[in-house]
Image: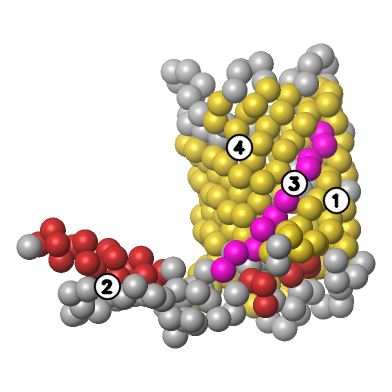
Amino acid sequence: MKNTRRLLHLAALFLVWNEPDSHGATKQPDVARDLAQTIASLFSITVQNFFVASRWDRPGTANVVEFRSLIPFKVWDQENLIRVDIPFRTASELGPGLSDVRFFDLIMFKTDTAIWGVGPVFNLGINRGPGTDSLQAGPAATFISKAIPSLSIGLLNQNFFSDQVAFSALQPILSLDLNKKWTIGLGELPIVYNWKKSTFAVFSVGLQLGVLVDLAKQPVRFFVNPQYNTRSNSQLYQWTIALGMTLPLSLPTTLPTTLPTTLPTTLPTTLPSSAD
């Protein structure tokens, strides 16, 4: 009996979580602009392929496919944003396999012209042998100004620390709307500072061009982002070309904090047309 009640509670939570959002992503007025942002209020899935065409101080190429999910939600009326990055090596000296997984949860604040957020960030590293840290954590923060129409400018800062590792990753944010479909900006330009060695390990420059198209009434953003790493560090990439696509999805932005005290004996076979 207890197990049955637990299953009913889980089913009720699942139904509440999956109710269609009356403010779904496809109804956003600036979908192209939001999908071009590293920090956005849209629930979205991004798949991008990073092809390392050349490296510093050594021959060879590499390829990584990355899956990213942006999940905005509210807890006790406070906006949060979770981002999860899952990279998978398809061509590398290490062979195919999962690479380091990163995720953060930012508490977000908004005004009419800016957004900012703070929260923890984690890096779950792959097993690199005994004596090597596989977990790093630290604070993350972001600020984006939208005071100028059609222009977003800001910075995303992530910091990772452990007994053996201390580095900060900075990502400048710059995106310009050319029209309702096309955007141009810096894209994902990693700037990494190694605190242990007191030097920049990665300093990239590049440009991203993106376009929003409709595929079977589903908006999809395609983008290309060539990058050049100016730091001549051994084993690090030199030229990288990123190709990807981002799909906005619909998800309730408010999570239930409590479950109903009584549950129906039968679950509904249809969902309501809009969230409460």
Using a 10 Å C-alpha cutoff, classify the residue at mark 3 as few (fewer than 14 neighbours), some (14 to 19) or many (20 or more).
some
Q: Amino acid at mark 4?
A: Pro
Please state the extent of the stretch shown in magenta in the rendering: 240-250
Q: Is residue 131 left or right of residue 46?
A: left
Q: Amino acid at mark 2?
A: Leu
Residue at horizontal 70 percent and vertical 55 percent from the top: 246
The answer to which of marks 2 and 3 sits earlier in the sequence is 3
Image colouring? secondary structure
The answer to which of marks 1 and 4 sits earlier in the sequence is 4
Query: Which residue in the protein does label 1 denote?
Result: 208
Q: Please indicate, yes or no, whether residue 147 appears anywhere in the rendered image.
A: yes
Query: Which residue in the protein does label 2 denote?
Result: 267
> Marks 2 and 3, Cα distance to the nearest angstrom?
39 Å
Pick whichever, 170 or 100, lies toward us: 100
> Marks 1 and 4, Cα distance to the nearest angstrom?
20 Å
Contact, mark 2 vs mark 3 (Cβ under 8 Å): no
Using a 10 Å C-alpha cutoff, classify the residue at mark 1 as few (fewer than 14 neighbours), some (14 to 19) or many (20 or more).
many
> Marks 1 and 2, Cα distance to the nearest angstrom?
47 Å
> Marks 2 and 4, Cα distance to the nearest angstrom?
38 Å
Query: Which residue in the protein does label 3 denote?
Result: 244
- Which of the 4 image quadrants contains residue 75? bottom left
Query: Which residue in the protein does label 4 denote?
Result: 87
> Marks 3 and 4, Cα distance to the nearest angstrom?
13 Å
The answer to which of marks 3 and 4 sits earlier in the sequence is 4
Q: Is residue 222 left or right of residue 115?
A: right
Residue at horizontal 56 percent and vertical 35 percent from the top: 100
